[in-house]
Amino acid sequence: MTESSEHTPHVFRSLSERLEAWEIAGIDTTPVHGGLHRARVRYAEFGLDHLLPLDRVLVGAESKRPGAWGGFHHPNQGYRHMQMAAVITMYGVMERATPADPGLAMLDVVRAYAHDSLHYGSARRYVLVGSRVMRTQYGINWRRPDGRSYSAADPQDATHTRNLGVVMEGACDREARRITRYVASRYGITSPGSPDDPGWWAYRDVTGQLGDTENPGDLGARIGGEAGGYVAALCRYENGVNHRYERWLADFGAGELEDLHDLVVAAIVSGDAIRLCRWLDERHGPGAFAGMFQAGGYLAAPPQGAAL
């Protein structure tokens, strides 16, 4: 697997190998195993019986880059749909082989694994376009063979979403953080006490307990280095994905947020949006799903000269 320059200094090992090495070093990995079990039980409710194999999850640590800082928001990590594998990094200081904050590192692994397992389990369809393989369906999002996406990108300053990519990402992370929050409570993993500590922000992030509008101000600069950049990145993700998804649930599922969320996740896994569309139609009128998400011109004839 070819990785970008952000990953070149890191040593990657499979999640099963990392867990074994951490256990040998005296790290309690029970929260990870508990989280994986919780994810299997929860996702089976949506018809997802096979989660990411542990040898398809590559965990980076032992970095040769001074000051390297890992975790869920490390640049260019996550699920790779063509390789059907996930690339993640150990939370915190990456220059060592074992985590400096084992509790937070275990929670971060649970969140990343649960999140990427939903991406792994999402319905998808591929077609050949000339000599290229193109993904034309991913969960409840579609793309024409000429590259047009079913839904348009949100404006950069939007506080809500009408983009299916954001909805699916938010739904996957909502599930992952629900599982991680359970693990933190079950195993007594608590937060560092000071907002000047990047772990204070990371704990609230992995457990889904950040505030309504996250703005770290100059905190990233005060913390400095990659740790400060990590805090800024997690706040951008929170504002750009999770808050927008929660706003969408509130706007269209008032009083029934959990029912709407469950329908979204079930549709992502099956690739069948009929029940979700029917639910929205009953509450917001016929064609509600398309009215929310379909980009203008999506069903029009392909642009002249477009590759098909």
Image (cartoon, rainbow, N blue to C red):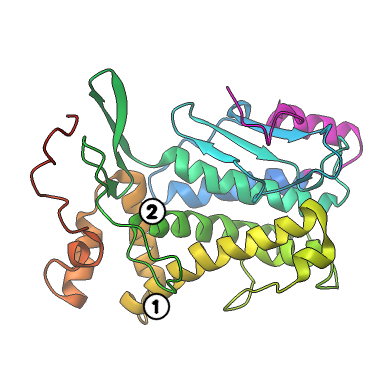
Report whether 301 appears left or right of 138: left
In the rendered image, the residue lying farthest to the left is 301
Q: Quadrant of the C terminus?
A: top left
Q: Nearer the viewer, residue 293 or 41?
A: 293
In the rendered image, the residue lying farthest to the bottom is 255
Residue under circle 2?
165
* Res 136 quadrant in image: top left
Residue 287 % position (x, y): 13, 66
* Label 2: how many Cα within 10 Å (few below 14, some 14–19, many 20+): many
Q: Residue at the location (8% across, 44% down)?
A: 301
Q: Earlier in the sequence, mark 2 or mark 1?
A: 2
Report whether 108 appears left or right of 79: right
* Label 1: how many Cα within 10 Å (few below 14, some 14–19, many 20+): some
Give the label, 2 or 1, closer to the camera: 2
Residue type for callout 1: Ala
**Residue 75 at least partly seen:** yes
Q: Is residue 72 magenta?
A: no
In the rendered image, the residue lying farthest to the top is 131
Q: Residue at the location (50% across, 64% down)?
A: 240
Label 2: which secondary element? helix
Q: Which residues are magenta?
A: 1-29
Which label is found at residue 250?
Answer: 1
Where 200 falls versus 64 (above or below)? below
